[in-house]
Image (cartoon, rainbow, N blue to C red):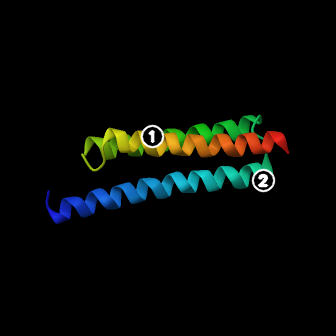
Amino acid sequence: MSDVAVDHREKAYALLKADADKILRLIKVQMDNLTMPQCPLYEEVLDTQMFGLSREIHFAVRLHLISEEEGKAILDNLEKQLNVLHEAAQNS
């Protein structure tokens, strides 16, 4: 694989990871300041953001910029972190 291809793969992965981190921060701010996880607005924002990220990942996989496993790992990691936030909100 050429250096350019590797660079594009690394950039794609970094951008997708940054988008996942942005979603986590958005949801954390929303939970801390605006609404609780059982609120329909929370669910709508979360669903919309997760759908958008999954489409970005699907696009990157189709371009062979990341593997399906890498994309799944990004989504799985984000879902785990969101579950931790959700549980913390319910326990406080």
Mark 1, residue position: 54
Label 2: which secondary element: helix
With respect to residue 25, does 37 lie above or below?
A: above
Q: Amino acid at mark 1?
A: Ser
Q: Is residue 38 left or right of residue 51?
A: right
Mark 2, residue position: 32
Label 1: which secondary element: helix
For the N terminus, the image quarter is: bottom left
**Residue in the picture at 33% in, 39% down:** 68
Provide residue 37's location: percent of width, then percent of height. 75, 39
Q: Residues within 10 Å of mark 1 (few under 14, many from 20)?
A: some
Real-space Cα separation, disc 2 to disc 1, in angstroms: 25 Å
Q: Amino acid at mark 2?
A: Asp
For the C terminus, the image quarter is: top right
**Residue in the picture at 39% in, 43% down:** 71
**Residue in the picture at 49% in, 54% down:** 19
Sequence order check, earlier mark of 2 and 1: 2
**For residue 72, what is the image quadrant?**
top left
Provide residue 3's location: percent of width, then percent of height. 17, 65
